[in-house]
Image (spheres, rainbow, N blue to C red):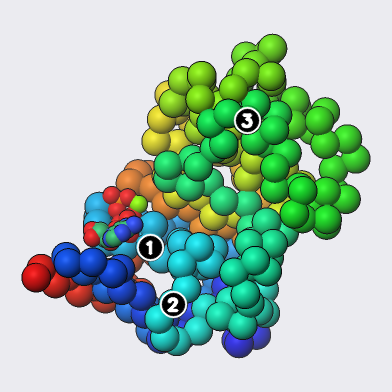
Amino acid sequence: MSKDSIIDLKDARFRWPGRASFALSVPEFLVEKGQSVLLLGESGSGKSTLLSMICGTILADSGSVSVNGTDLKTLSGWSRDRFRAEQIGVIFQQFNLLPFGSVTDNILLPLKFAPSRRKRCHNPSRQAAELCQALGLPEGIASSKAANLSVGQQQRVAVARALIGAPPILIADEPTSSLDELAQSNFLDLMFHQVAAQETTLIMVSHDPRLADRFDRTVHMNDIATIQRQAS
Ligand SMILES: Nc1ncnc2c1ncn2[C@@H]1O[C@H](COP(=O)(O)OP(=O)(O)OP(=O)(O)O)[C@@H](O)[C@H]1O
Ligand SMILES: [Mg+2]
């Protein structure tokens, strides 16, 4: 584990199973605590696969992936889920909301498994409502089922769920893809405010290189990873 790196990948490899397999290999990728990183790369270059390895939703086949000093392969599936809930606010590319849960249920969900995040929220329900308001979700939406929201509204709920309780790390996979320009800029302001106030480490994927100015560092997939595609 390199000094001060909160995210530390060494010789990490992952191959998706299946007939048309895709393999990602990351010789070294280090992110310092408190750093904000914009991750760029063409579609299919393995950005979401890399983020899934960092979140521990998939486990590297070889090499090491350490997050805040813990090598993810040393954790069982259950403890990896809890570790993720505590350490990482994740905005998945497909949002992954509970469709039958309300907006509030979805936003508060990670706190159930993350006592430290919960402790940072003095009043979780009020905090959820404040995040909704800051993200421009209409008032009165709190009890609506996630499945009944527009795609842009669902994305904002996913954003609120990632930010609540200020986890030390934020992983955001194209978090503004369904937002209009104003909502996008509101979200980025809110996120960077939290990142600065809490010394949050941020990795965000986007297809918009114009955002680079807002980040400490821009990384291109070509610079940190090699990929192999095999059609069979
Ligand atoms: N769940 C999966 N099962 C099998 N193969 C997958 C799966 N997810 C991704 N892949 C493979 O990994 C490759 C890289 O996908 P990935 O989603 O990591 O790319 P990406 O850079 O995030 O692309 P995009 O910009 O379109 O989101 C895909 O081309 C696909 O072959
Ligand atoms: Mg992706």
Mark 1: secondary structure:
helix
The residues bearing labels 3 and 2 have C-alpha atoms spaced at a distance of: 31 Å
* Nearer to the camera, 159 or 232: 232
**Mark 3 or 2, closer to the camera:** 3
Cβ of mark 1 under 8 Å from ligand 1: the answer is yes
Q: Which residue is mark 1?
A: 49
User: Is 139 drawn above or below residue 55 in the view shown?
Assistant: above
- At a point 63% along the width and 77% down the height, the residue shown is 75
**If you read the primary sequence from the N terminus, does the residue marked by circle 3 or circle 1 appear first?**
1
**Snapshot quadrant of residue 32:** bottom right
Question: Do tag 3 and tag 2 residues touch (Cβ < 8 Å)?
Answer: no
Q: Is residue 80 left or right of residue 171?
A: right
Extreme left residue here?
232
- Residue found at x 23% / y 66%: 18
Mark closer to the chain start, 1 or 2: 1
Residue 208 x/y as whole percent: 35, 44
Q: Look at label 3 and name its amino acid.
A: Gly
* Residue marked by disc 3: 101
Which label number is shown at residue 60?
Answer: 2
| Residue 175 percent across, percent down from the top left | 47, 41
Q: Earlier in the sequence, mark 3 or mark 2?
A: 2
Tag 2: residue type? Ala
Asked whether mark 2 and ligand 1 are closer than 8 Å, the reply comes as: no
- Mark 3 CB in 8 Å range of ligand 1? no
- What's the distance in space between the residues labelled 3 and 1, CA to CA? 27 Å
- Residue at the image point whose x is 46% and y is 62% from the top: 52
Position of the C terminus, as image quadrant, is bottom left
Q: Residues within 10 Å of mark 2 (few under 14, many from 20)?
A: many
* Residue found 69% across the figure and 33% down from its top: 105
